[in-house]
Structures are given as C-alpha cells and as structure tokens.
Amino acid sequence: MNRRDFVTAVVAGVVAAPMLGSAAKDSFPTRKLGRTGLQVPIMGFGSGSRFLMYQDEEKALEAVNRALDLGITYIDTAHSYGDGRSEERIGKVLATRRKEVTLSTKIAGRTADEARRQIELSLKRLKTDHFEVLHIHALRDQKDLAAIEARGGAMEAFIEARNQKITRAIGITCHADPVALKTALEQNDFDCTQMALNAGLARMVDVPGGMKAKQGGTECFETLALPVAVQKKMGIIGMKVLGQEQLLGAAPLEDLIRYTLSLPVSLVSIGMPKLEHIEYNAALARRFQPMSARQRRKLAESIEASHKLAMHRFFLSHEDVA
C-alpha cells in the first residue's frame, strides 16, 4: 500500500470518529515510562516519514502543536529523519513549548565519537540542552550490536550522556531482529527500548516465501525481547503498530492500535500525516479499553499470511531514515 492509499484508508476511519475540539490535556491517559520516573501519554507523535509527508512546514508545525494541545506530548524523532529536517521542525515548536514535551530522539552513529557529534547536532536542531530519552537507532543484528558495545563504540557515548544529564534515559530501538534486541537488553543497562510490536508479527505461520517463524511467535519481539524489557522494568515504546501500512485492511485500524496498547508497553509511537489523524488517534487513546489475551490471539490469527509475509519482507530491508 502506497502513501496515498494509506492516507485514504485512515481518513475513511476518521469520518466516523469523534472530533475532540480543544479537549484538556490533563484528561489524556498516561502510563509510567518504566523505571525512569517519567509519566507519559499512552500515544506518542512519530516524527519520521509520516511527519515528513507534511510538505508545507507551517502545516507540519501546526500538526505538532495540535498534538501537544490534545495531550500527545511524547515526541519521537531521530537525527537521521529527513537529513535533520524532522528535528529542525520539532525544534521550532520546542522553542516555546519545551516544558510540555517528553522528547525522544535517536542516534545512528556506531562509534562513540560519531554518536557524540550527532548528539550535539541534535541538541542544536531541537533547540534544547537535554533529552528525556536518547535511543541508539535501529539495531540491525548481532554484528551491529558488537560494534555498539565494543571499546570506543556508541554505548560509551550514551552512558556518558546519561551521566552528564544530557539525557534522563537511554535506550535502543529495533525493527527486524528480536534475537539481537533480546541480547542487547540482557547485556546492557538501558532504561528504555522501542520495538516493532503489532498483531501481524504475533503468531506468524509458515508461508511460501521463506517466513520461518512458527505459530506462537517464537521469533517475534513480543515473545523474545518484550519479556526481558518487562523483567528489567524498562520503559517500553511500541512502534510499527500498523506494520508500516502492510496491515491496513487486514484488520480494523482501531483494533490494531488497541492490540499493541494492550501489551505491557508504556506507549505507542504513531506517525500521523494529516491533522485528522491526530484528532482520530487522540480520541481513540481517550476511549481505549484493553484487549484480553484471548481477543489479542484471535486478532493475530485473523490476519492473513499474505499480509504477514509482506510485512516480514518489508522490515528485512527497511532503513529507518526517512
């Protein structure tokens, strides 16, 4: 599904959704961000490729401000998004609203020196002197983890940033290798983690084309990395709730979001490329009711193998830089 189809599909759901007007932020549901001491909204504003779909900068800034007005005060961006354009846009809003925001950005540098340079540039773009959350961006595999953990690797810069109070919490994100993320969480002192959690990744079955994860999700984040994060009391951010649009049409949009929010996560980060999406998602978060384990299992089993395979293939080559 291309971006135009994505927008059409979501807006179709917006038509029947209640509009929130100027609802008070203090009524937005929140959860603890693990052991960090931070309280965060259950939904964050994803500022990657969907945020960059706002071609007009004024519209982009309006979107961020609207999200904050409605209580979506967790902002999720990255050093590499749009070659810095995402952070620069967010920075223009933070110039006057920094105290309202739980700010998270991601750094892709794999050496300590490269990570330090990127952290400094991100601070400058975002017009701030600190982050609430600073993530190592997009762990790829075990080899990538070894580079991060090596002497002179990025982990040194992240621990330094936390010690110097440049950030309150450090974490790591991952899209496609739950084994590598499980290892990373077990071996390192992370406060947070962000991982792909959705109904399509759970209970995958063998299908033609090379998918080997067995029924029960033995190779998914939900069964491998998530329990480690819970056991270590980390702040857990669910992402790719819609499977980068690969799950649209496979199940109702609201059910897909409810599925991930019903897991032991602090929040979900979602891209919202139209103002209507922000209104719709804020309304959804306010009326959220958790799914039971049985309901989650039923939803996961209802998603056709073709959707799961398309998503699986997409994430194998996905580069989270847009």
Image: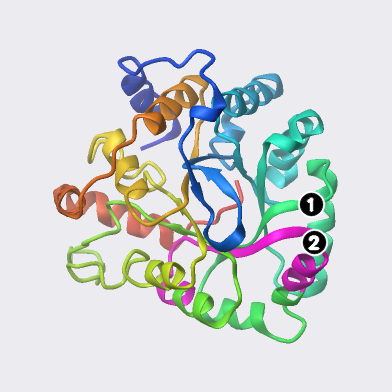
In the figure, is residue 235 to the left or right of 204?
right
Viewer-nearest residue: 121 or 232: 232
**Region rendered in magenta:** 157-181
SS assignment at label 2: loop
Circle 1: residue type: His
Give the x, y percent position of residue 14.
Answer: 36, 20
Mark carried by residue 130: 1
172 in relation to 298, above or below: below
User: Label 1 crowding class (10 Å Cα cut-off): few <14, some 14-19, many 20+?
Assistant: many
Residue to which mark 2 is pinned: 165
User: Label 2 crowding class (10 Å Cα cut-off): few <14, some 14-19, many 20+?
Assistant: some
Q: Quadrant of residue 176?
A: bottom left
**Residue at screen point 31% across, 69% down:** 223
Q: Quadrant of residue 143?
A: bottom right
In the figure, is residue 215 to the left or right of 109?
left
In 3D space, how far apart are the residues under numbered discs 1 and 2 (Cα atoms)? 7 Å
SS assignment at label 1: loop
**Residue at screen point 14% across, 48% down:** 302
Viewer-nearest residue: 221 or 177: 221
- Say if the magenta span includes residue 93: no
Give the x, y percent position of residue 105.
Answer: 67, 51
Q: Are marks 1 and 2 in contact (CB under 8 Å)?
A: yes
Q: How is the image coloured?
A: rainbow
Viewer-nearest residue: 162 or 305: 162
Circle 2: residue type: Lys
In the figure, is residue 157 to the left or right of 244?
right
Give the x, y percent position of residue 263.
Answer: 34, 54
193 in relation to 20, above or below: below
